[in-house]
Image (tube, rainbow, N blue to C red):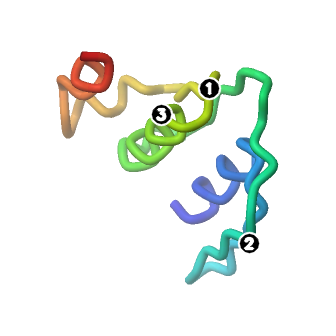
């Protein structure tokens, strides 16, 4: 999960390092282009990346349907 999280954060414009047991985030030059972050069917990563979409315009979660297994109404709650 850490590798997926750090990869997605980098794609969104954050500067970070994942060492296998810790994640260090140094700062950001946030993306302005639309991006779709891959979650590799991990609902926890989909939750995390969906929160990026709240603060960064044009951030989308690919494979967002994987959230259905733990919170079926999540996307409705986020938009409602």
Identify the residue position indicated by label 3 in the image. Answer: 54
Q: Residues within 10 Å of mark 1 (few under 14, many from 20)?
A: some
Element at label 1:
loop
Q: Nearer the viewer, residue 27 or 5?
A: 27
Q: Nearer the viewer, residue 56 or 64?
A: 56
The numbered mark at residue 19 is none
Picture coordinates of residue 10 (x, y %)? 75, 52
Count of marks overlaid on the render: 3
Element at label 3:
helix
Q: Give me the residue at 73% from left, 55% from top.
A: 14
Picture coordinates of residue 33 (x, y %)? 79, 24
Q: Give me the residue at 77% from left, 36% from top.
A: 31
Question: On the image, which quarter does residue 58 sit in?
Answer: top right
Q: Is residue 71 left or right of residue 37?
A: left
Q: Give me the residue at 38% from left, 42% from top.
A: 47
Q: Is residue 67 above or below residue 34?
A: below
Q: Quadrant of the C terminus?
A: top left
Q: Are marks 1 and 2 in contact (CB under 8 Å)?
A: no
Q: CA distance from mark 3 to mark 2?
A: 23 Å
Identify the residue position indicated by label 2 in the image. Answer: 17
- Of mark 3 and mark 2, the one earlier in the sequence is 2
Picture coordinates of residue 21 (x, y %)? 56, 83
Q: Is residue 48 above or below residue 24?
A: above
Element at label 2:
strand
Identify the residue position indicated by label 1 in the image. Answer: 57
- Of mark 1 and mark 2, the one earlier in the sequence is 2
Q: CA distance from mark 1 to mark 2?
A: 24 Å
Q: Residues within 10 Å of mark 3 (few under 14, many from 20)?
A: few
User: Which mark is in front, 3 or 2?
Assistant: 3
């Amino acid at each position: 999960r850490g590798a997926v999280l750090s990869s997605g954060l980098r794609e969104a414009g954050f500067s970070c390092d994942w060492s296998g047991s810790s994640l260090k985030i140094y700062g950001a030059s946030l993306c302005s282009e639309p991006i779709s972050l891959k979650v590799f069917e991990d609902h926890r990563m989909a939750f995390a990346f969906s929160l990026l979409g709240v603060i960064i315009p044009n951030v989308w979660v690919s494979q967002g349907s994987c959230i259905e297994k733990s919170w079926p109404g999540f996307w409705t709650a986020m938009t409602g």
